[in-house]
Image (tube, helix red, strand yellow):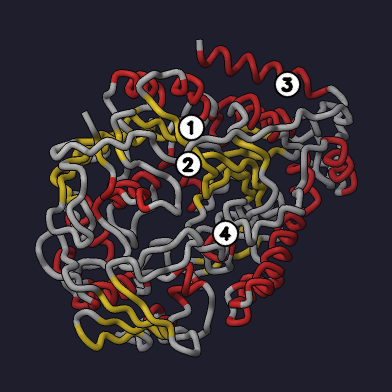
Amino acid sequence: MRKQWIILVVGLLLAGCSESHSQARVEMELPIFPVEVSNTSLPLEDGEMTVALVSSDPFEGTLSRPFYSGSFDAEIMTWFDESLLSINSDFEITNEGAATYELSEDKRTITLRIKEGVYWHDGEPVKASDLLYAYELLGHPEYAGERYTFTIENIVGMDAYHAGRAKEISGISVPDERTIRVTFKEATPSILTGFWSVPVPRHHVGDVTKGELTMRDLEASDKIRVTPIGFGPYIIVKIVPGESVLLERNENYWRGRPQLQSVVLKTVNESIIVESLKKGDVDLARVPVDQYESVGRLSNIELLGDLDMAYSYIGFKLGTWDDKKKENRMNPNAKLATKLVRQAMWYALDNESVGMYLYHGLRFPATTLIVPVFDSYHDVGNQGRPYDPIKANALLDEAGYIDVTGDGYREDPNGKPFILRFASMAGGDVAEPIAKYYIQNWADVGLQVELTDGRLHDFHSFYELVKSDDPKVDIFQGAWGTGSDPDPSGLYGRQALFNYSRYTSKLNDQLLKAGTSEKAFDAEYRRAIYKDWQALMVEDVPLVPTLYRYELLGVNKRVVNYSIDSKSENRHVWRWGVSE
């Protein structure tokens, strides 16, 4: 009955598309949720918590920070591994973590000192050379991952090392086993919000720099897929690939003894998560928003929520990745190279109805590519391109896309059929209705859009299509978690592999560089730069931010100390426990 109800709602929305846009829109009132559980009991000494990885697909299981790509792999790693430096509620590094830091007077050199008593799970001390190894992997000429970003590239000597012209990174020194010094080419505020401080256990995974194994061997190694180690609060005991992970308390954790004796992480399909929470099969789960009302009615569950550091988007394929030059290249002959068409396609999207009716008001129209969580940098005055099919039609007319055959669909300026192929990901009850609704939105302004291969794609095949710039994809629907650094160059820079639209421009280069310059330590200057950058992206529309979102979690009432408040000590996994 659930799927029938959603399809019925979509039918109602489509039926309303012919109504004049001048009618008043329903104003969305954003809900408020608690961010911390109410249970303040003492946790059980031998308690076990079961956490759901809510997905219709297995988790990938690449449990190493330089190499992972899936969000569930990232979630698994929070339990057994961590950064040497902690961050505060403003996403800036602090001295509260396993290491302390000092920034030089010229703000170009950062020195980390690892605290006493920080050990890998096999008993070996965490060394400064382990953090050096992370940089050697990220900058290695054979590195094919997606984290060779500005803060890595900005290190003195990294460009020569990355190009294979040097065997060492000249800007990194290790004076002793607990001290590492990193010098950057340019002083930048991203040092404080995007500094990489996650070490890699060289002794455990093997040393690529000494030829013990290749980069490809390491990424596929059992040492990061079957028996990974970290220095975090819990130790991995057993992994059932793609299905579950069993962890036990790290008695030698540097912060102190974790509250839980054991943790079970397991994949749970979206279709049964409500029943799993109701039965107590899982204690903690991210709740698909189309099921939050059902979870909210469960007597044994508390529902927590807050604005998420994420947004969904529609991307336009504008070029390809140049693997030789390691940069994005625009294609002037791309189907969507005309900016007016992209602007029109944004105006055609009725995101407000999607957020209200399919997501119960828990997602709401996105306006810019910097999320509201970054309240210092998100431009509240920029309203993006709100739903306006009249403007969409006018822009398409202006661009010369006219229906010359009378079939209801526009041809291109040369009178040839204009058919766009749209890649969208499967998952949950609403994925297909949303994709079909967007296709209908575009049809309402005369654009013919068809699903790539005539269907939705699973997570892995979707990203294979998008990452490889498959010619079967003109439009794609995805989502980004932004991370803690407001700098967007890792997603939208010329050298950013994550820049799946492959958009580049000189002004984009200039603004992104200015936003991470020494001058950007001045917060007012940086705000102005990112305001201009948001305006540029609304003007050029390499992609459409569609919906901002809430992160919703169903938590069993036996869970103690759980919090998603960034200002609370209880945000740390080692503090979570369970009571009777």
Q: Residue furthest front?
A: 41
Q: Earlier in the sequence, mark 3 or mark 4?
A: 3
Q: Position of residue 48 (x, y in %)?
A: 19, 36
Count of residue discs:
4
Query: Who's the residue at 73% across and 65% down the image?
Result: 532
Quadrant position of the C terminus in the picture:
top left
Which residue bears the numbered disc 3? 14
Q: Quadrant of residue 15?
A: top right
Q: Earlier in the sequence, mark 1 or mark 2?
A: 1
| Label 2 with label 4: CB-CB less than 8 Å | no
Amino acid beneath label 2: Phe
Which residue bears the numbered disc 2? 462
Q: Earlier in the sequence, mark 2 or mark 3?
A: 3
Query: Who's the residue at 60% across and 26% down the image?
Result: 360
Give the distance between the C-alpha atoms of the residues marked 2 and 3, in whole angstroms.
26 Å
Q: Earlier in the sequence, mark 1 or mark 3?
A: 3
Classify mark 1: helix, strand or loop: loop
Give the foreground label among 2 and 4. 2
Query: Who's the residue at 59% across and 79% down the image?
Result: 517
Query: Would residue 512 appear left or right of 536 to someone viewing this image?
Result: left
| Label 1 with label 2: CB-CB less than 8 Å | yes
Q: Position of residue 445 (x, y in %)?
A: 81, 33
Which residue bears the numbered disc 1? 426
Give the foreground label among 3 and 4. 3
| Label 3 with label 4: CB-CB less than 8 Å | no
- Tell me if mark 3 has few (under 14), some (14-19) or many (20+) residues whose alpha carbon lies within 10 angstroms of its own: some
Which residue bears the numbered disc 4? 320
Q: Earlier in the sequence, mark 2 or mark 4?
A: 4
Amino acid beneath label 1: Ala
